Image (spheres, rainbow, N blue to C red):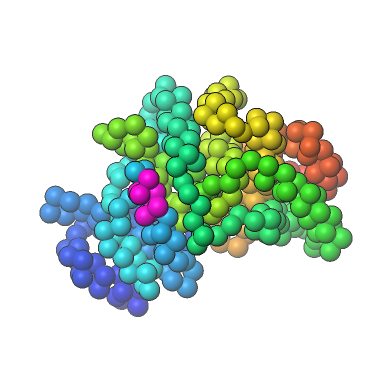
Amino acid sequence: MSDRDTRIAAFLAKQGWDAADRRTLADDASFRRYDRLTGQGRSAVLMDAPPAKEDVRPFVSIAEILRSLDLSAPEILAQSPEDGLLLLEDFGDDTYTRVLAADPDCETELYMLAVDLLIELHRRFTVAADIPKYDDALLLTEANLLIDWYLPAITGNTVTDSLRQDYAKLWQALFVQTRDTRETLVLRDYHVDNLIWLPRRAGIRACGLLDFQDAVIGPAAYDLVSLLEDARRDVPSDLAQRAMDRYLAAFPDIDPDAFRLSYAILGAQRSTKILGIFTRLDRRDGKPDYLCHLPRVWRWLEADLNHPALAALRDWFNRVLPPETRTIKT
């Protein structure tokens, strides 16, 4: 038995779950894994996040904030942060992804519920000083994943300092324009794989929240982008427009044009980040399954680059990564 297995066994024994049946629930794109524990008429989820790779404390902190706002984040049943272990309330298996696959007719209902949750969160959340900021440096670090991983994989060439500097200047000129609307808690991975249908709960509490440990304080448009420009799922344009209109109607003080510009910039930034992350998962981590989503990510990126304010960045992409080069061969 490895040291990791020994620590997990000790944690479960301490919490009275040592005799439980344990089955893998999910791995994700990080180093975390999740196991479902069942036995004696109860169930829970074990989050296993090796401390050398992950820190569970932000998850605990954000979960407490979300639950204080009466949103459905999992209750923390037990924790051992030094071991990277959490025991979580089990929300079941009905992720939005699975529910939509079984019943596509509920698409509008589920998406509008997710928008309503964002509206409530953005209305009620009070900025907390101990949550990291989604500042320009972090946004640029993420955007750089494209030139750190995707561009070399496509071209086979090393990225020059000059190209890197030109790319950074274009983004820096755009990021400042994302600050023209309100800032709030940004969950960062707000999409159908991380939302779960809890029909026995009323109102927005029927939308359960998962995978929010990387939350930051940043532009309000970001999580709407995550939801509607989903790397793993096509979202119909008419549904996306209705979702945008629903959100803006809830905040009449927001300038719609400034919000849509922020949305386009953040959408482009998020897509460049995902192109880099999915390439890194393939090349570094041996996880090629994510590459099948790259054409969709490019469609989202190209749509956002069509905003007039992003013309200079669009020109950079057309010059450095013309359309015929935008596919990684597996």
Image coordinates for residue 63, horizontal then vertical, percent? 38, 53
Q: Is residue 285 left or right of residue 314?
A: left
Verify whether residue 66 appears in magenta.
Answer: yes
Verify whether residue 47 appears in magenta.
Answer: no
Q: Is residue 185 left or right of residue 84?
A: right
Residue at 35 percent of width and 49 percent of height: 68
Main SS of the magenta part reads helix
* Residue 226 falls in image quadrant: top right
Q: Quadrant of the N terminus?
A: bottom left
Q: Nearer the viewer, residue 146 or 289?
A: 146
Image coordinates for residue 110, horizontal then vertical, percent? 42, 30
Q: Nearer the viewer, residue 133 or 285?
A: 133
* Residue 21 falls in image quadrant: bottom left
Image coordinates for residue 124, horizontal then vertical, percent? 45, 42
Q: Is residue 46 left or right of residue 272?
A: left
Residue at 79 percent of width and 33 percent of height: 308
Residue at 37 percent of width and 37 percent of height: 207
**First to last magenta residue range:** 63-69
Q: Is residue 40 left or right of residue 312?
A: left
Can residue 204 be seen from the camera position used here? yes
Can residue 199 be seen from the camera position used here? no
Image coordinates for residue 160, horizontal then vertical, percent? 84, 62
